[in-house]
Image: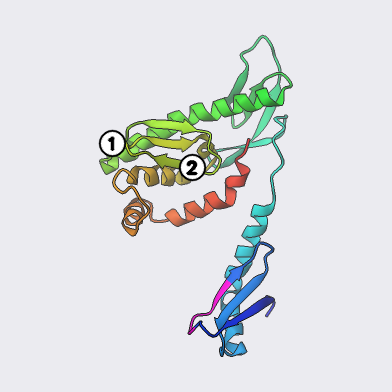
Amino acid sequence: MDIKYSLKRSRKRKKTISLQIGNNSEVTIYAPYYTPVKEINRFVEEKESWIDKAIRRQAALQVSPQEKSYVTGENFYYLGQLYPLEAYFEPLENAGVIFWNRRFFLNCPANAEMKKHYFISWYRKKALQYLTERVDFFGSMLNLKSGGVRISAASKRWGSCSEDNHLSFSFRLMMAPPEVVDYVVVHELMHIREKNHSSKFWDLVVEVVPDYQAHRRWLREHQHYFNL
């Protein structure tokens, strides 16, 4: 067995063996006091694939992407795909960002804050158009009427539903794949029916998005790439 672990036994623990992975990828096993080592090792072996994936995922999350420089050749996410940027400055043309032929074009002076501003503005505009269309689509399908769509700059909260059913979404959702975006839209629409995250709420979500857990996991694992 390749996995090294620390063992913590407890007289209070009756039957259950559990594990925990720390911030430095250390594996700790918690077991009832008299559990045989052979049984503990068997438990770890059964979880070996899961532990390996969890450690790899944790390592990926700890790698901080470099700050955007907004230079030619740099890649930006749009609906789950990476596309290259061509940056230039032509004062006689309109400044800003356009997306054409699977490539971003940015016309802007050599000013990082101004370049960032134009990119955020582009994502916000696309988000309002795209997310409004998806809210209308699922709202009609589910017979749910929202109070309108707003776009935020939230970096960790993908969406929210207010008491008066106004839906708010982060412009960063435009960097996620369409199926992940749809999950967030359905999630917030279902809050019109259930203003909580009870089992009843998740039952509503799973009826429309059976694999919603995979989409939640994708957001957790990729959100650190969506900073501008």
Q: Nearer the viewer, residue 137 or 38?
A: 38
Q: Quadrant of residue 203?
A: bottom left
- At which x and y percent is residue 116? 64, 28
Please tell me which residue is depicted at 60% across the width and 64% down the height of the picture.
54
The rendered magenta stretch, by its main secondary structure, is classed as: loop
Q: Secondary structure at mark 2?
A: loop
Residue at mark 1: 145
Q: Inspect the image, locate mark 1, and give the three-letter code of the amino acid beneath it.
A: Lys
Image mark for residue 40:
none
In the image, residue 136 above or below residue 55:
above
Looking at the image, is 11 positioned above or below residue 125?
Answer: below
What residue is at 69 percent from the left and 63 percent from the top?
24
Q: Which residue is mark 2?
A: 158
Q: Position of residue 52 (x, y in %)?
A: 63, 67
Residue 93 picture location, percent across and down = 64, 12
Q: Residues within 10 Å of mark 1 (few under 14, many from 20)?
A: some
